[in-house]
Amino acid sequence: MKPRVLFADDDAVVEGLRRTLWRMRARYDMVFVAGYDAALAALVHSSFDVAVVDPAMRGPGGMSLLAYLRAERPDTLRIAFSGTCEAAAWVDALALAHRFVSKPSSAENLVAHIDESVRSGCACSNGMVTTLRALSEPQALPKAYRSALAELTKPEPVRMTIARSVASDIGLTARLLKLANSAWIAPSRPIDSVDRAVEHLGMELVHAALLLLGIRGDDDNWSGENSDLVERHGTLVGTIAAKLVAPRDAAAARSAGLLHDIGRMAFARVQPIEYRALCADTESERELSRHEFARFGGDHTQCGAFLLGLWGLPPKVVASVANHHDPVVGAPATLTVAEAVRVAELAASHELDERWAGNAETAAEAQWRAAMVDRVGQEIERSGLEIAR
């Protein structure tokens, strides 16, 4: 069955979308409506997988429609599709939509966002998809998070605007400065301002860090020790992974590594007591994944990738999170982001050793694995990283 997609905008825009996306009719079951009332009428008679709504739509408005969808149709993915540049409007729209696509946009770009939204939930059970969609609501995040994330979704985000948003929240400021000054990030001199932290970390890593800190929250659902461990482990994996890829992929590798276990934090938020007990009763990642799948209909790799897909992170980051427990197959000359995260995760878990190197199917792969063990060891030693057991 084709995904059903609702497009709601003003008259002229809707007609333009209809003409532009007509060639996609074999892929989607599309409904185009003009205005709030027509959109509500369509929603009364049918359900939709995705709704693409302009928050600035005239009449009762797109914001009211997004709010209605959030309250009455939580299973529908909400994409805010707008050309507004007002900061307040961006923040408000981001509070109601799962992702924001800026106008003007090519048909290919809009379709890519719809495809990613539809695909992101395929690996999880229907019940878990609904739960994670609710958890992913940006409105659940503090205002400082929403404001910073709104700026980060713009085509050309302004560093100072992000810094001001972060600096308005003392907890967020402390945690971002802690990350920027960590041994894994290795600044050349201490970073004592949020602006310098954002500049040093880069937009992509700041985006990833805000999502991780936001999903963790300030409560004690999963105990501070476990949450801290996931953050430290993720930062270490991202740091190692960034050293194993081509320079152009370093930012994506660092972000994917930082976020690779975000699904564990999500489970801890939705079922804190059960997940704490589940983690206490398992001794390996493979066993943990089996228990997660039995309990939640998906493991932390799949459900973490689902959340990141909702938030619109780059596909290579989402894919790396989804596949970070897959084995490294063959002996690639150049590591992709996903492969680098897998290798880095093994290193951070003390599994990248002679046993791993010797457990290869061919002599060539065994030689490559041995060389990888040496290379990662040298990178860790050169960077002064410490991998605690």
Image (tube, helix red, strand yellow):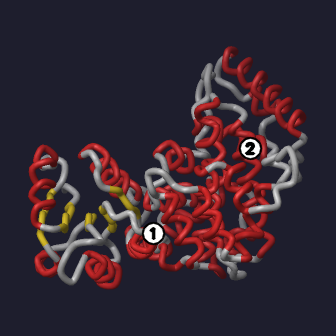
Residue 266 image offset from top left, x and y in percent: 58, 69
Image check: 276 left or right of 349?
left
Residue in the picture at 58% in, 50% down:
204
Residue 217 image offset from top left, x and y in percent: 65, 76
N-terminal-most mark, 2 or 1: 1
Looking at the rendered structure, the secondary structure element under dot 1 is helix
Few, some or many residues within 10 Å of mark 1 (<14, 14–19, 20+): some
Image check: 311 left or right of 198?
left
- Residue type, label 1: Ala
- Residue type, label 2: Thr
Q: Nearer the viewer, residue 60 or 182?
A: 60
- Asked whether the viewer can see residue 79, the reply is no
The residue wearing badge 2 is: 239
Residue 55 image offset from top left, x and y in percent: 30, 71
Image check: 92 left or right of 34?
right
Residue 194 image offset from top left, x and y in percent: 72, 62
The residue wearing badge 1 is: 87
Image quarter of the N terminus: bottom left
